[in-house]
Image: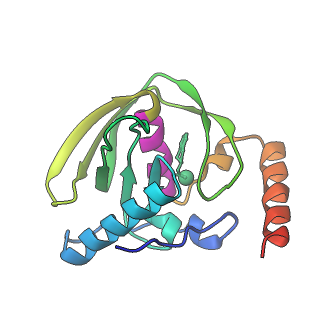
């Protein structure tokens, strides 16, 4: 297993639209393991392949608390089938270190995807899991949480991250 480098905004690769996975091969399974290790190491509740510079429709999520057993969810070629209601969550993103902003999302989603074995599954989610699924699915389309904010907030966050980038080695 290996930890992967997480791209930071405004890296242009975060804006690329990911392509479907043709087949869940051992190489894809290795990538999924590396993504999970990278997510746990960060730590984050989710990670999309786009964030590690891989243009494939894959994300991993684990919303289990520290005192709970881990529960890795793997989504390959995910499709959002239903979105219902609205909720506002204070979101973070590993590609925006130190940023947390309230984002409006659907309260309930139904998603279909392939798991790490290439088997199709469907899942209904609400609360944080629904937020994470929408956040990660957006990454696969090059959509970032700042796109859901006002132009002013986006500009302030852009400046903050530019400052961080010039301050860190
Ligand atoms: O670690 C993460 N936390 C988080 C909190 C609220 C809503 C969404 C997220 S996802 C984020 C990890 C990440 O950047 N995934 O793309
Ligand atoms: Ni993110």
Numbered range of the magenta stretch: 129-139
Compared to 101, does 164 lie above or below? below
Outermost residue to the front: 67
Closer to the camera in the image, 153 or 163? 163
Q: Report the number of numbered marks.
A: 0
Q: In this view, does 26 lie to the left or right of 4?
A: left
Q: Is residue 26 left or right of residue 52?
A: left
Measured as percent of width and height from the top left, residue 32 is found at 32, 65
Quadrant in which the N terminus appears: bottom left
Compared to 129, does 87 lie above or below? above
Compared to 30, does 39 lie above or below? above
Measured as percent of width and height from the top left, residue 117 is found at 15, 60
Quadrant in which the C terminus appears: bottom right
Q: Specify the quadrant of the image occupied by residue 26.
A: bottom left
At 84% from the left and 50% from the top, the residue drawn is 156
Q: Specify the quadrant of the image occupied by residue 24.
A: bottom left
Q: Does the magenta stretch include residue 29?
A: no
Colouring mode (rainbow / by chain / secondary structure / one colour):
rainbow
Measured as percent of width and height from the top left, residue 35 is found at 40, 64
Residue 168 in view: yes
């Amino acid at each position: 297993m290996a930890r992967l480098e997480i791209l930071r905004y405004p890296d242009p690769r975060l804006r690329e639209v990911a392509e479907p996975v043709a087949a869940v091969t051992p190489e894809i399974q290795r990538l999924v393991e590396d993504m999970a290790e990278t997510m746990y190491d960060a730590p984050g509740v989710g990670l999309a392949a786009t964030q590690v510079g891989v243009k494939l429709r894959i994300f991993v999520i684990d919303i289990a608390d520290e005192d709970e057993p881990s529960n890795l969810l793997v989504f390959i070629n995910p499709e959002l089938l239903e979105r219902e209601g609205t909720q506002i969550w204070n979101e973070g993103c590993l590609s925006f270190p130190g940023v947390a902003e309230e984002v409006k999302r659907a309260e309930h989603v139904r998603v279909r995807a392939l798991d790490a074995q290439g088997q199709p599954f469907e899942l209904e989610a609400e609360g944080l899991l629904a937020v994470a699924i929408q956040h990660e699915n957006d990454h696969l389309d090059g959509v970032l949480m700042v796109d859901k904010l006002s132009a002013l907030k986006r500009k302030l966050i852009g400046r903050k991250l530019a400052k961080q980038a010039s301050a860190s080695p």
